[in-house]
Amino acid sequence: MTRLWWVRHGPTHEKAFVGWRDVPADLSDQALIDRVARYLPSEAAIVSSDLSRAVTTADAIGRNRKRLAHHTGLREFNFGLWDGLRFDEVTARDPDLSRRFWEEPGDLAPPDGESWNAVASRVNDAVDDLIRACPDQDLILVAHIGVIMTQIQRAAGCSAYEAMGHHIDNLSVTDMTLAADHWEIGRINHIA
């Protein structure tokens, strides 16, 4: 049995799309960071996306846990030409595509970016690799909202649209378990 503890990185305070663009996390809420670190299993290994907002969050909550190498497969969606644009700018630039991207998640992708299905496949592969490398171990994965939502879809067996309906706060914890050959979803968006 493997239990995954997903932690969304600290807030960036960005008002625009942030995908592969590397922006720092605000980790000034030390009390919340301490609560998250205490809530997570102490014997778990910890891994993060290679984007700095996830790396520094993992470092802040890692404490004495075994640190695994950063994993590019845990990166946020590549929003392509939308990265760095505000939602109203994306809507003005690509009105039909921007609406359908959220309402019909699947194979639609932003210009020069990734679709939901491409990200889910990439993240599933990364998670499967990590589970094989750390069998029957708790893993803390510090990543991004889109990444976590793809794994909610996987564990809950719901649609992408339903998975996107979940709220995932910065520094929240979402847990799921792979027991035998099936996934079980635990708490979603737990605030320690």
Image: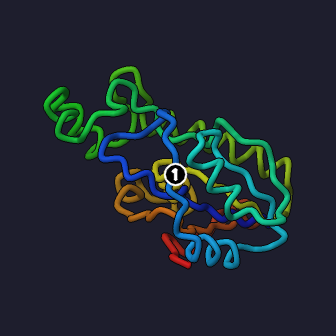
Dot 1 crowding, Cα within 10 Å, few <14, some 14–19, many 20+? some
Q: In the image, what residue occupies the spot 50% across and 71% down? A: 188
Q: Position of residue 66 (x, y in %)?
A: 85, 58
Which amino acid, mark 1?
A: Ala
Residue lying farthest to the top in this orientation: 112
In the picture provided, is 17 more to the left or to the right than 37? left
Q: Please count the marks in the image.
A: 1
User: Which residue is labeled 1 in the image?
Assistant: 25
Q: Position of residue 87 (x, y in %)?
A: 23, 41
Snapshot quadrant of residue 129: top right
Please state which of residues 121 and 41 is positioned toward the viewer in this rendering: 41
Q: Position of residue 13 (x, y in %)?
A: 38, 53
Q: In the image, what residue occupies the spot 60% across and 70% down? A: 33
Q: In the image, what residue occupies the spot 28% across and 34% down? A: 85
Q: Position of residue 163 (x, y in %)?
A: 42, 58
Q: Is residue 108 visible in this depiction of the protein? A: no
In the picture provided, is 40 more to the left or to the right than 77? right
Q: Is residue 182 visible in this depiction of the protein? A: yes
Q: In the image, what residue occupies the spot 82% across and 63% down? A: 65
Which image quarter holds the N terminus? bottom right
9, above or below 169, in the image: above
